[in-house]
Amino acid sequence: MYCFPLQDDLVITKVGDCWKLIGMVDMGTTNENIDIICKGKKVTRLASQALQFVFHGFTGFRWPVSYYGSTTATSHQLYLTFWKSVDALEEMGFTVDYMMADGATTNRTFTSMLFNGDPREELFLFKNVYNREHVMVAIQDIKHVLKRIRNNIESSRKENKENSKGRYLVLEGQAILWDHWEECFLFNYQGGFEIHNKLTEDHITLTAASKMRNQLAIDVLNKNMLFLMKSYQQTLPDPERLSSSIRLLEATSIICDIFCSINHPVTSMEDPRIAEISQALQFFNRWEADILESSPTLAKKNLMTKETRDDINSSLVGFTSLCRQTTGKGNSLNPGFLNSDLIENFFCQQRGIRNGLNSNPTLEQFAKSSTAIVLGQCLVSRRANASESASSSYFRAKLSRPLNSTRKSRKQIKVKI
C-alpha cells in the first residue's frame, strides 16, 4: 500500500458505449460521504496521487490489485480502501494474511485503527472484519525502519550533548554518535586497503535525496560496518567510547543479514533466525526500558523516536507472528521478500519504461501503463530502492491448485506454473 505522485489532468475517454471522466479523486462511495459530512458540501477535486495496493503471496506471486485516485490520503480513507481490497481478493479466492506499509504518519494512524488496544501487546495481530476467525498481521517495511534507525543516529552528534536541540543517543552511559561512523569512514581509506568496500562519501554526508535510498542505510548498519568499527576500535587509546555504537551495530547487522538478502525461507519456528530476531528485539526494548526508567525527562533526547521504536517492534514482532501462523499451516516465508522493493520497482517502471522518464504521469497514463507492466515487464530499475528480489518470479506463482478451495466464490481461479 503506497502512494504514487500524479500530474493533475482530466481526460474524457470512451469505455464501451459510455463516456467516462478520468482524473478525479475517487476513493469510494463511503469516503465521499464522509467528506460531505465533514465539509458540509460535495467537493470535486483532481487526483494528485494514486493509492496503489499490491498482493504479494508467500510463493512469490505478486499482482497490483487496485489503485485509487486521491490527494493526500487520510487514515480513514486508507482503512476503508484497504478492507475493500481485502474483500475483493477474498471474493476471488485469495487469502490475505498480512498488511505492510511504510512509516508515514497516516499509515501509522491507519495501522492503529486495526487494533482494539496496544499493538505491541496484541503482537500486531488483528482480526479480519469479514472473517473474525481469521487473524492478520500488521508489519512495517523493514527497509524503511532501517532508514529511520540510520537517520536517528545521523542526528546524534557531539555538539548536541549540551544543546537543548538535537538528539544525543545514550546506551549504558556511552554515547552513540554519527561521529563514530565518520571516523570509521576516514579510517577505512587509510593504507589504501578498504575494509568496507562499499562505503562512500554518500553514505556519510547525507542529503535529502540520499536519505531516501535504502541501500545507503543498509550499508552503514550491516555486518561489514560492524567489522569496520571493531577494527577501528582496536586502534584507539580509549576503545570503550565505541562500545555502545558497536552494540547497536550487532543488533542492526542481524536485521540486515536476515531481511535484506534473499535467504532460504523460514519453514518452522525452530529456525535459528527466529531466535536472532528475538535477540535483536530484546536489545532495542531493553534499551528503551532502561532509559525510560532512569531518566524519563531525557528519553526524547537519549532514545530513538517513539515512532522508530514502534516500527522496529512492528517489523520484528510482526514477522515472528506471521511465521508462527504460516509455518503452523505447513507454509514457508522468505524474509527477503517482506519489503517494498516490488512496488518501488513497479513505480519506477511507471516513470521510466512506460512514460518516457516522466516522473508525473496522469491518472489515465498510470492506468494504461499498469496493464502493460503486468503483461510484459519483469525488469528491475537500477535508479531506485528496488533490489533483485523485486523481479524474482515476478507475477508468477508456483502452485497448480486453487488458492483458497474452502471459500465459495463467483469464480474459481487457478494459478499455474
Image (tube, rainbow, N blue to C red):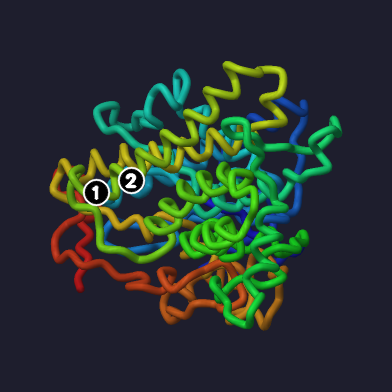
SS type, badge 2: helix
Pinpoint residue 279: horizontal percent, then vertical percent: 37, 39
Mark 1 packing: few (<14 Cα in 10 Å), some, or many (20+)? few
The answer to which of 56 and 10 lies nearer the viewer is: 56
Seen at 59% across and 24% down, the residue is 291
Marks 1 and 2 in Cβ contact (< 8 Å): yes
Residue 5 in sight in this render: no
Q: Is residue 264 left or right of residue 9?
A: left
Seen at 54% across and 72% down, the residue is 195
Is residue 302 depicted above or below 104 in this figure?
A: above
Q: CA distance from mark 1 to mark 2?
A: 6 Å
Pinpoint residue 11: horizontal percent, then vertical percent: 71, 66
Q: Amino acid at mark 1?
A: Pro
Is residue 360 depicted above or below 129 in this figure?
A: below
The residue at which mark 1 appears reads as: 272
Q: Is residue 264 left or right of residue 383?
A: left
Residue 95 in sight in this render: yes
Q: Which mark is residue 276?
A: 2
Q: Quadrant of the C terminus?
A: bottom left
Q: Which mark is residue 113?
A: none
The answer to which of 106 and 332 lies nearer the viewer is: 332
Seen at 41% across and 22% down, the residue is 121
Q: Is residue 169 left or right of residue 172?
A: right
Q: Amino acid at mark 2?
A: Glu
The answer to which of 98 and 199 lies nearer the viewer is: 199
The answer to which of 85 and 19 lies nearer the viewer is: 85
Pinpoint residue 246: horizontal percent, then vertical percent: 53, 49
